[in-house]
Every structure is written in C-alpha cells, then in structure tokens.
Amino acid sequence: MPGLAVVLVGEDPASQVYVRSKGKQTVEVGMHSVEHKLDVQTSEANLLAVIDQLNDASIHGILVQSPPPSQIDEEEIVRTIDPAKDVDGFHPENVAKLALEDSSGFVPCTPAGCMRLLEASGVETSGADAVVVGRSMIVGKPMALLLMARGSDATVTVAHSRTKDLAAVCRRADIIVAAVGIPEFIKKDFVKQGATIIDVGINRVEDPVAKRGYRLCGDVDYNDVFEKTGAITPVPGGVGPMTIAMLMKNTIKAARAL
Ligand code: GUN
C-alpha cells in the first residue's frame, strides 16, 4: 500500500489544518498515512535526523510542511529528503527535472493542480499570455515552468514585488496566476475582460461577524473582479483541494517507482 509521511514542526494553525487534511485524504483514498509532529523548538539537526529515518523507512512519500520555524533552514530540508520520496517536488534534482521537462521527477503539487484545472476547464494555454504573480519555490517558479513547457506553450511573465506597474502587466494576461500572499490584492483594474484567474492565495483576515473571528480569502478580490473574468477559482475550495489531489498522485507515483 502506498504510504505518505507528513512532518509538521511547530503549531502554526494554518499548517495544522493543511497537515490534517493531507493525512485525512491519504487515508480516504486508501493509502497509509504517518504524521510526525515535532516541537516548535526542534533543532534543525533533529528534524534532519527524522527525515533521514524516513528516507530509510518503508514509506514512499515524505513531505515536511512549510514554512518551518525560523531556526530551521528550508533549503536543508529539501536537500535532505530522498529525491525519490520528494512528493512535494522541492529537491534540486526534481526542480532540475521540471526545468528539463523530464517527466520522471515530481512536479510541485500546487502548480500541478493549477495546470490540471486549466486543462479540465478547457482553457487554451497555447500562445496565451500568462502572468504569474509571485516567484516562490513552491508556486511561482514551478508554475512559470509548467506554463511555458512544451504542450502548454504559454508566453509567461513572472511578476513580483519589484515589478513596475503590476496592474498594467496583469491587464495583458489571458491567464493570471496569483500567488503573492496578500489578501484581495488583485482588483478589477488588473484584469482584462474574459481573463482566466487562478487564485493560489489563502489568507486569514479578521472578520468580527465570522464565527471564528476570521474569514479565508485569496490574493484576488473575487467579488471585485468576478464580472470581468471568463473563469475564476474560489478560495477556499479552488486550488486547495487540487493541491492535495496532486499530492496523492505523486505519492502513488513514488510507490510505483520504488
Ligand atoms: N506550504 C504551503 N504549500 C505547501 C506545499 O505544497 N507543500 C509543503 N510541504 N508545504 C507547503
């Protein structure tokens, strides 16, 4: 039976939610799930030792939830995970394979899920102008590589915090992928009529009316842009479930290969 180990360091509430749903989904699809919860003060050496054990154990996939506490260097984590078990696709070997369009590697789950959404919704990517807002290792960079890859064939612009006149850059886009981590940052003046918007953001904003005292929103002001869009993903319930679906897929791929 394919198995996935999820490691969480610390008690970040959002990370706890993600880790719980990853574990739950793993079991629901009939796979074996292992969770390792480490104290917020865990040293880097300790975490790396846990990863080493998992590298040697009979588990197919390993995922360490990001971001880790500040005493831990994320780069060290991704370099330590066995690339054959790196279902997040963050190890340099898998990043290189993505850039080389070598399909034997693991593709990061969130961008893979975004591509799947585009395909399933019949959005034409070939020749399309795509703007990726954000250049993170987890979303922005791999997303740009996937959109420009052979078979997808989009013309890709990667925008970030230093981009000049971001609204004008986004207005050229047939497809916008928003992954900046700023609540409701993308407004209607960023959007060309009929554009497709994929909102990767998931932000907690205070809301005195909400039961928990906060609500979840994306990086896109959904209500503001809605009328102008050809298609748009909601938050929550858009990209999030796709990320987990792709994690399941990567875990099965790891199990088949090992
Ligand atoms: N934090 C936010 N997204 C992700 C992800 O896809 N994988 C991991 N490990 N951490 C994350």
Image (cartoon, grey):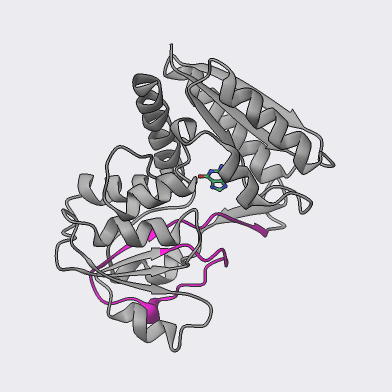
Where on the picture, by quarter, is residue 205? bottom right
Q: Quadrant of the C terminus?
A: top left
Foreground residue among 174 and 86: 86
Foreground residue among 60 and 202: 60
Residue 144 at x, y percent in the picture: 34, 62
- Residue 51 seen in render: yes
Against 148, residue 93 (above or below) is: above
Q: How many marks?
A: 0
Q: Is residue 189 magenta?
A: yes
Residue 169 at x, y percent in the picture: 35, 82
Residue 11 at x, y percent in the picture: 76, 40
Q: Is residue 198 left or right of residue 48?
A: left
Residue 117 at x, y percent in the picture: 29, 47
**Residue at x-position 58% and y-position 17%:** 57
- Residue 239 seen in render: no
Q: Is residue 15 left or right of residue 11?
A: left
> Dividing the image into four equal quarters, which quarter contains ligand 1?
top right
Residue that extends furthest to the right in the rendered view of this protein = 41
Q: Is residue 31 left or right of residue 249?
A: right
**Residue at x-position 38% and y-position 36%:** 246
Foreground residue among 46 and 199: 46
Q: Quadrant of the N terminus?
A: top left
**Residue at x-position 34% and y-position 47%:** 97
Residue that extends furthest to the top in the rendered view of this protein = 1
Q: Is residue 219 magenta?
A: no
Q: Which residues are magenta?
A: 178-206
Against 85, residue 42 (above or below) is: below
Where on the picture, by quarter, is residue 222? bottom left
